[in-house]
Image (cartoon, helix red, strand yellow):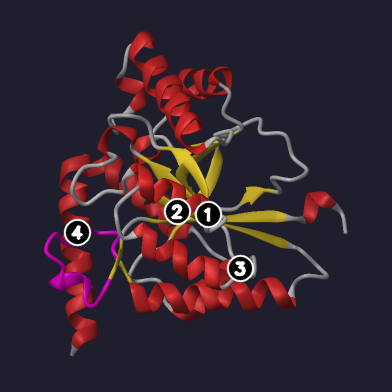
């Protein structure tokens, strides 16, 4: 198979919640129910077994923010023989609702990987060069010291970055920089990273048939283009409020 024909589906999750996302104490737009998550991981496991001879789509499962529920998500992955990447906000380790240092070691024992989501979760393009280097370098150093592993992955908060941030990340020693631009990434095994990597957010609205198309390489991302234009037209604040209201309405409809 021509390596150029291989692409990577970098799936992005946030919180994995038990029960109904709308009934969670602090509902968030990206919350995915644990039952749905387990089914999706089973589909990935089945896909990798059936696709082992072709390898047309490589799959990376990633998690943002390092919330405490990610420990249970890691156990689901481990039982299926899968390895995810958990992007940790270093400054929130050992605080309520987030992973602690002991949890990081448990993740590694479950054959999971760790990446940096910076120290403070601030938007990186807004920072001075000194602040930017601190966010990138100190988070990487701390995670490497605690894990004993090389930290190669960075997820800029909000997926927001520019060329200055990208070059600073490469200089700091990161090998992969994952954005929130929707789409497939090239094969990570054969392609040097010359630009940030696209990813595919998984939401509570992601239907099973849609998920199967994504991991089979047939995902469509026209919604992302519409979303970008809408955000530019009405502004980030109004867009976020509209997005959250629409998601809550959709979830309530599913309960009927």
Q: Residues within 10 Å of mark 1 (few under 14, many from 20)?
A: few
Please provide percent x and percent y for residue 49: 71, 75
Q: Which mark is residue 81?
A: 3
Viewer-nearest residue: 163 or 171:
171
Residue designated by label 4: 244
Residue designated by label 2: 106
Q: Secondary structure at mark 1?
A: helix
Mark nearest the camera among 2 and 4 is 2
Viewer-nearest residue: 28 or 93:
93
The residues tagged by marks 1 and 3 sit, at their Cα atoms, a distance apart of 13 Å
Viewer-nearest residue: 46 or 245:
46
Q: Looking at the image, which residue is at 29% across and 55% down? A: 68
The residues tagged by marks 4 and 3 sit, at their Cα atoms, a distance apart of 34 Å
Quadrant in the picture for the C terminus: bottom left
Nearer the N terminus, badge 4 or badge 1?
1
Q: Residues within 10 Å of mark 3 (few under 14, many from 20)?
A: few
65 on left or right of 154: left
Q: Which mark is residue 234?
A: none
Q: Magenta stretch containing residue 58, yes or no?
A: no
Please provide percent x and percent y for residue 178: 51, 41
Magenta part of the chain: 18-31
Q: Secondary structure at mark 2?
A: helix
Quadrant in the picture for the N terminus: bottom right
Q: Which quadrant of the structure image shows residue 100?
A: top left
202 on left or right of 185: left
Identify whether 127 is placed above or below 153. above
Q: Tell whether label 1 touches label 4 (CB within 8 Å).
A: no
Viewer-nearest residue: 48 or 102:
102
Q: Looking at the image, which residue is at 35% across and 25% down? A: 124
């Amino acid at each position: 198979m021509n390596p150029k024909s291989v692409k990577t589906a970098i799936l992005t999750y946030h919180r994995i919640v038990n029960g109904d996302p709308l009934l969670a104490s602090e509902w968030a737009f990206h919350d995915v129910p644990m039952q749905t998550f387990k089914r999706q991981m089973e589909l990935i496991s089945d896909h990798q077994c059936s696709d082992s001879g072709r390898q047309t789509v490589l799959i990376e499962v990633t998690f943002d923010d390092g919330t405490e529920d990610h420990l249970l998500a890691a156990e689901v992955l481990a039982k299926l023989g899968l390895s995810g990447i958990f992007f940790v906000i270093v400054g929130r380790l050992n605080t309520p609702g987030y992973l602690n240092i002991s949890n990081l070691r448990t993740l590694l024992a479950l054959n999971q990987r760790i990446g940096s989501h910076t120290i403070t979760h601030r938007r990186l393009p807004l920072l001075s060069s000194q602040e930017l280097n601190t966010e990138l370098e100190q988070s990487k150093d701390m995670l490497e010291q605690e894990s004993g592993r090389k930290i190669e992955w960075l997820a800029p908060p909000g997926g927001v970055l520019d060329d200055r941030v990208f070059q600073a990340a490469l200089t700091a020693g990161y090998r992969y920089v994952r954005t929130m631009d929707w789409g497939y990434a090239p094969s990570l095994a054969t392609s040097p990273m010359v630009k940030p990597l696209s990813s595919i957010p998984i939401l509570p609205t992601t239907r099973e048939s849609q998920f199967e198309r994504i991991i089979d390489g047939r995902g469509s991302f026209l919604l992302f283009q519409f979303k970008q234009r809408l955000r530019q037209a009405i502004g980030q604040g109004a867009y976020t409020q509209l997005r959250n209201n629409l998601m809550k309405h959709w979830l309530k409809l599913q309960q009927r």
